[in-house]
Amino acid sequence: METLSITDLNGAGLPYGSYPRLILVWMTTEALRTGERKLDLGRSLSGYMGKLGLQVTGGHWGTIPRFREQMERLFGAAISTRWKHDQELQSNVGGSNLLVAEEFDLWWTPQKLRETPLSRSSVTLSQKFFEQLVEAPVPLDLRAIRALKRSPLALDLYAWASLGSLYPSVGRR
């Protein structure tokens, strides 16, 4: 038996939908490209969203507040796996916990652009997450990601299929 769970560590809620998936793809790509755990998100949330090919709209129901909320949820989450294997008279239980972000610093204030500090927003990936990325990268075609960005299921299936093509034992028991 194997389980995967996501835990909200900072009270922002659990990440969901396409935005956290797109953010993860960008972060993993950027970390591999730069070789750095600390990633620069820039001075502008709309600029960062543009890097992901997202439409930028303000207001209460716009994309900007929803995107920022999902960033905070993702950066405050822990991903845990647990497994249990019973064979004959032996039982093995194990697990692993992974923080996505060790630190994050978001300075974007859409309504007060002139008052925005000169600091740039950033996220620092956890050491364990970064090491796992470097050890076993899964290349994803960013053109495919942009085409699938509206569907969390399509993004998951594409990533799973890409992982399976590199590591054939993934998803097979």
Image (spheres, rainbow, N blue to C red):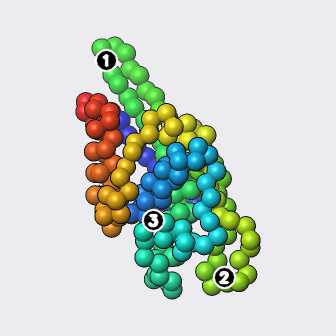
Question: Mark 3 falls on what kind of element?
Answer: loop
Where does the image place residue 65, in percent across and percent down from the top left?
52, 76
Q: Quadrant of the N terminus?
A: top left
Q: What residue lies at 43% left-to-right and 71% top-to-bottom? A: 54
N-term-proximal mark, 1 vs 2: 1
Q: Nearer the viewer, mark 1 or mark 2?
A: 2
Taking depth in this image into account, of 51 and 60 the one nearest to the observer is 51
Give the Cα distance between marks 1 and 2: 61 Å
Label 3, residues with CA under 10 Å away: few <14, some 14-19, many ≥20: some
What residue sits 31% from the left and 62% below the top? 148
Distance between the Cα atoms at labels 1 and 3?
Answer: 46 Å
Q: Position of residue 63 (x, y in %)?
A: 46, 77
The residue beneath circle 2 is 113
Residues under numbered marks 3 and 2 in contact, where contact means CB atoms less than 8 Å apart: no
Q: Can residue 130 be seen? A: yes
Provide the residue designation for mark 1.
87
Looking at the image, is 58 positioned above or below residue 161? Answer: below
Residue 52 numbered tag: 3
Question: Residue 151 is drawn in which quadrant?
Answer: bottom left
Three-letter amino acid code of the residue under disc 1: Gln
* Residues at marks 3 and 2, CA–CA distance in whole angstroms: 21 Å
